[in-house]
């Protein structure tokens, strides 16, 4: 996390005159939607900056939950799955973007998982069925996640023509229908507002001896 | 059929009670039935809830099992990897573990990936998309489905990894075994059937606790279902919801059932499935069968008891009536000894005492009448009818004991003459005295009766001829001395006849008749008694046939008149002839008038006979007149003739018919004939005399000749009986008697005829004594008409000429 912040700070410093996008994601009911990811993809993929350092990210397991709920990462990120609970977890994914499993372990897993294909990777735990986490593997480095107010800010956007997309683990329908075209030139503030519909929040059936868990 | 009052009464009671009981029974039955049906209906509704709950619980446990099992990591892995074989084997394993009959794996795009009961994969769409939609919302969907013609309880849950990567459908068959289990858990042992109703194929049984369901039964259910409106059914939302269920009674499976039809909502609207819950009424009523049994038993018992009581009551009411009826019947049969025993204070009691008074009265009067009818008023002896009864009972006794007995008949001679001369009161007194004397010779066992005015009969039991004769001897002895009445001594002569049972007859009438015949014969005997002798009985054999022969004889001209001439002693001329009837019986030959005249009198033919004789005689007279012969014909008149007031008229008409005068006929009568009923006889005689007929007293001297009567009779002629004439020539006594008679007659102005002239001397004596006419065999026997005519013609009507010849 610290690294990411550091990296962003670096980016801001290097592209002083770069543009900033302010985005918001709302529900049809006008309520803000948190944990939505807005990303900007240059129309020409060749404009994507090269990855000089292999980025790393963490997907914690804490209190029998994946934290964060969803984690957007750039393609080629090594994600660590530190187990901060005092029980074992069995992290797995059957998603085409990344199939893997980290059998019963506790503490920090020995080795991070490299996400080398763009797409959504759904994380489950074979021991705790309700545990659900998402890793959103993006080709672009221009993305951010909304806060509780449904707001986000992406800074340091170089001049280019972009496709602005929105994603959310429970987004209903095709993501592409929300795509927006955006051109950025110089230091400017642009905005991208999305109104999306979410699928209902899944609730796991209560199992004997357990409290109902929400995710 | 129900004539008796008692029966009617009992019947009314019984019908009343029966109808009350029937009404009660049916009221109880109907009420019970209604309650039972209502109870069953509510229980059925309750059971329906249970039934639905059970289905739901099964689905729940199925889905829970499914969820746990779908969490199997290897399974998820296999699915994620698209490893069909592994997936299927896991599914089969899964199915076996939770006893599922079918497991289907469905892709997120709704295609069947794998199916434990089918090899199809990949292309085929999962048929219950609606369930998936629900499962998307609820993480599970449960429904009853029809799959490949079988009924399943079906659950769909997602395969989560951890988001859904596929759907797994798990089905448990609802088959007979399962519905039986549901039935076993149901509080009411309902029969449960699941039926599929298809528009084209009709219906099919998917599962049932019943072994068989007939089409007609299901048809009835469908009809019932159709009553539920379409809207009602279409508003049903959600699985396991059903339309408004209303239990109904239906004739179903050949018996009355309370049924309930529930439409089962399946995810495919084309699959119309119903659940049919039914409970046979008979089963519901079975706990009440013993109640009905006892109700029936109590009804029958109380009916029997009520019948018994009503019979008793009816008897109580009708018993006095019956007693009275019985008393009336007894009275009808002549039993007055038993009074009506009915001690009651009511109207019937009073009726009964009135009955008793009436009974006593009738009994007294009847006894009096009976006594009168059985006894002779004068002597107090048994009369003829009573004697007949005694005789009959004696015959009965003797028949059994094989004993003889005697019937003795005692006839008092000349009683009529005594009555006539001394008066009836003397006669009556005499009869009493005679009865006293007869009683004195009787033994206790003997019965004495007076059967006619002058005839007594005596029944001597256990008496043969010898004993009978000894009794007769005693009777004869008692009559040997005279009776003294009012200072007059009267000699009484009796004739006695005896008949014996069983030799002379075996019935009372015959015995009396035989005794009578014997008595009749005894009159002429020296001893004045006789035992019946069949040889001498001319009456008995042909009497009956003679009566009928008599009538026939008249028609067939079997009768003939013979004429015996009488000569006028003054001039020896033949001036008169007596017409004497002769009967040539076709079988028996010549019948003496003494025999058939009394018969004709008895049979009532005598007037016919007399008329015949009169007509013949008058005709003959007329024919003689034509010849110039003046001969008067004497005709004998019977007693009965003299009692016929029309006689003078009849004779006159006859004479007119043949144009003859009254002088042509001489009417001969006997003294005794007049004595029978002097008043009428004298009246008739007076008329005849006034008309100019010559009346002659026949057989004079044999009867109880009374000079006074002779005077009263006012006859013209007097005919001296032949008994005085036949021996006239030899008997001096007879000469004196005849002479006196002639003188007496002449003195009274009568002409004298002598009959029975047997010889010349007698004729001369009569002539000397101025007798007017003579008749007898010496002159001529009675002749048939041809001979008479010849005889008369040859004598030219003058007797002397013949005598001279």
Image (cartoon, rainbow, N blue to C red):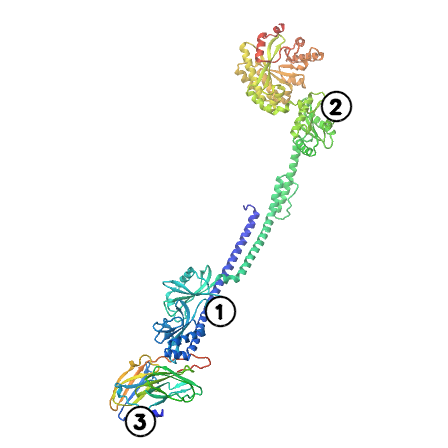
Q: Foreground mark, 2 or 1?
A: 1
Q: CA distance from mark 2 to mark 1?
A: 132 Å
The mark lying in front, picked from 1 and 3, is 3
Horizontally, residue A157 falls left or right of residue B93, namely: left
CB-based contact (under 8 Å), mark 2 and mark 1 = no
Q: Is residue A82 above or below residue B548?
A: below
Q: Quadrant of the N terminus of chain B?
A: top right
Please say if A189 is above or below B528: below
Residue A145: horizontal and vertical position, in percent? 33, 87
Q: Earlier in the sequence, mark 2 or mark 1?
A: 1
> In this figure, which residue is indicated by the disc labeled 1?
B185
Disc 2 designates what residue?
B480
CA–CA distance between discs 3 and 2? Answer: 205 Å
In which chain is the residue bearing label 3? A
Determine whether the residue tagged by mark 1 lies in a helix, strand or loop: helix
Secondary element under disc 2, as helix, strand or loop, is loop
Separation of residues labelled 1 and 3 (CA atoms)? 74 Å
| Label 2 crowd (10 A; few <14 / some 14-19 / many >=20) | few
| Displayed quadrant of residue A109 | bottom left
**A202, A3: nearer the viewer:** A3
Chain under label 2?
A: B
Asked which quadrant contains residue A182, the reply is bottom left
Q: For this view, does B465 lie left or right of residue B140?
A: right
């Amino acid at each position: 996390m610290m690294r990411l912040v550091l990296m962003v700070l670096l980016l801001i410093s290097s592209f002083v005159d770069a543009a900033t996008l302010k985005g918001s994601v709302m529900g049809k009911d006008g309520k803000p939607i948190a944990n939505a990811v807005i990303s900007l993809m240059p129309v020409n993929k060749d404009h994507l900056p090269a990855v000089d350092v292999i980025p790393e990210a963490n997907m914690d397991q804490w209190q029998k939950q994946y934290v964060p709920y969803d984690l957007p990462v750039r393609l080629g990120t090594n994600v660590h799955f530190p187990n901060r609970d005092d029980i074992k977890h069995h992290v797995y994914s059957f998603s085409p973007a990344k199939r893997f499993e980290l059998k019963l372990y506790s503490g920090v897993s020995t080795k991070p998982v490299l996400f080398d294909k763009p797409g959504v990777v759904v994380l489950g735990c074979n021991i705790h069925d309700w545990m659900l986490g998402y890793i959103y593997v993006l080709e672009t480095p221009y993305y951010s996640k909304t806060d509780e107010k449904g707001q986000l800010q992406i800074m340091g956007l170089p001049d280019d023509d972009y496709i602005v997309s929105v994603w959310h683990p429970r987004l209903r329908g095709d993501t592409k229908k929300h795509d927006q075209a955006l051109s950025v030139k110089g230091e400017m503030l642009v905005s991208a507002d999305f109104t999306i519909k979410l699928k209902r929040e899944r609730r796991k059936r209560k199992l004997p001896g357990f409290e109902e868990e929400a995710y | 059929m129900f004539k008796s009052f008692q029966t009617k009464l009992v019947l009314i009671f019984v019908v009343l009670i029966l109808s009350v009981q029937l009404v009660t029974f049916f009221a109880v039955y109907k009420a019970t039935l209604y309650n039972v049906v209502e109870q069953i209906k509510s229980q059925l509704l309750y059971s329906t809830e249970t039934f639905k709950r059970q289905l739901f619980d099964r689905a729940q446990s199925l889905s829970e099992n499914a969820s746990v099992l779908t969490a199997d990591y290897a399974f998820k892995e296999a699915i994620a990897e698209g490893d069909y074989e592994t997936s299927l084997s896991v599914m089969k394993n899964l199915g076996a573990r939770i006893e599922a009959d079918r497991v289907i794996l469905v892709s997120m795009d709704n295609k069947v990936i794998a199916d434990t009961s089918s090899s199809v994969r990949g292309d085929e769409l999962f048929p219950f998309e609606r369930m998936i939609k629900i499962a998307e919302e609820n993480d599970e969907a449960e429904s009853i489905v029809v799959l490949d013609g079988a009924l399943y309880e079906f659950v769909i849950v997602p395969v989560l990894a951890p988001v859904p990567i596929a759907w797994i459908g798990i089905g448990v068959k609802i088959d007979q075994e399962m519905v039986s289990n549901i039935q076993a858990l149901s509080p009411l042992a309902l029969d449960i059937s699941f039926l599929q109703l298809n528009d084209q194929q009709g219906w099919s049984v998917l599962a049932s606790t019943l072994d068989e369901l007939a089409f007609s039964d299901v048809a009835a259910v469908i009809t019932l279902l159709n009553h539920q409106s379409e809207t009602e059914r279409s508003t049903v939302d959600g699985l396991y919801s059903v339309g408004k269920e209303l239990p109904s009674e239906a004739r179903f499976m050949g018996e009355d059932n309370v049924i309930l039809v529930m439409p089962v909502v399946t995810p495919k609207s084309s699959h119309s499935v119903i659940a049919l819950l039914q409970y046979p009424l008979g089963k519901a009523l079975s706990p009440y069968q013993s109640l009905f049994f006892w109700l029936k038993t109590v009804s029958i018992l109380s009916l029997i008891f009520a019948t018994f009581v009503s019979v008793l009551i009816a008897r109580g009411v009708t018993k006095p009536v019956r007693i009275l009826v019985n008393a009336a019947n007894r009275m009808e049969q002549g039993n007055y000894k038993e009074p009506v025993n009915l001690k009651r204070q009511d109207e019937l009691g009073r009726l009964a005492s009135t009955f008793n008074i009436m009974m006593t009265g009738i009994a007294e009067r009847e006894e009096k009448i009976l006594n009168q009818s059985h006894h002779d008023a004068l002597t107090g002896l048994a009369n003829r009818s009573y004697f007949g009864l005694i005789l009959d009972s004696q015959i009965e006794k003797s028949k059994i004991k094989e004993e003889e007995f005697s019937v003795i008949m005692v006839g008092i001679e000349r009683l009529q003459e005594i009555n006539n001369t001394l008066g009836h009161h003397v006669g009556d007194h005499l009869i009493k005295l005679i009865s006293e004397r007869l009683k004195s010779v009787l033994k206790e066992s003997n019965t004495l009766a007076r059967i006619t005015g002058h005839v007594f009969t005596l029944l001597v039991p256990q008496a043969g001829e010898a004993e009978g004769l000894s009794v007769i001897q005693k009777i004869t002895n008692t009559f040997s001395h005279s009776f003294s009445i009012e200072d007059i001594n009267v000699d009484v002569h009796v004739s006695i006849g005896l008949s014996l049972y069983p030799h002379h007859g075996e019935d009372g009438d015959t015995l009396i008749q035989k005794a009578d015949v014997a008595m009749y014969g005894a009159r002429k005997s020296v001893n004045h008694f006789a035992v019946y002798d069949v040889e001498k009985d001319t009456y008995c054999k042909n009497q009956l046939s003679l009566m009928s022969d008599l009538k026939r004889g008249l028609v067939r001209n079997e009768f003939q008149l013979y004429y015996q001439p009488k000569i006028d002693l003054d001039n020896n001329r033949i001036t008169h002839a007596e017409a004497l009837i002769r009967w040539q019986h076709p079988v028996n030959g010549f019948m003496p008038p003494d025999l058939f005249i009394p018969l004709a009198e008895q049979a009532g033919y005598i007037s016919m006979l007399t008329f015949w004789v009169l007509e013949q005689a008058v005709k003959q007279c007329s024919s003689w007149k034509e010849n110039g012969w003046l001969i008067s014909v004497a005709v004998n008149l019977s007693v009965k003739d003299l009692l016929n007031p029309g006689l003078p008229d009849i004779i006159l008409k006859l004479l007119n018919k043949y144009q003859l005068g009254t002088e042509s006929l001489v009417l001969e009568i006997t003294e005794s004939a007049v004595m029978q009923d002097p008043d009428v006889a004298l009246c008739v005689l007076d008329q005849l005399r006034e008309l100019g007929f010559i009346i002659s007293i026949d057989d004079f001297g044999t009867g109880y000749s009374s000079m006074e009567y002779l005077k009263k009779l006012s006859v013209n002629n007097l005919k001296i009986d032949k008994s005085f004439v036949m021996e006239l020539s030899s008997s001096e006594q007879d000469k004196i008697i005849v002479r006196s008679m002639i003188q007496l007659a002449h003195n009274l102005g009568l002409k004298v005829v002598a009959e029975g002239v047997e010889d010349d001397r007698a004729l001369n004596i009569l002539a000397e004594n101025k007798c007017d006419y003579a008749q007898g065999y010496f002159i001529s026997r009675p002749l048939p008409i041809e001979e008479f005519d010849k005889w008369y013609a040859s004598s030219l009507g003058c007797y002397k000429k013949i005598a001279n010849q």
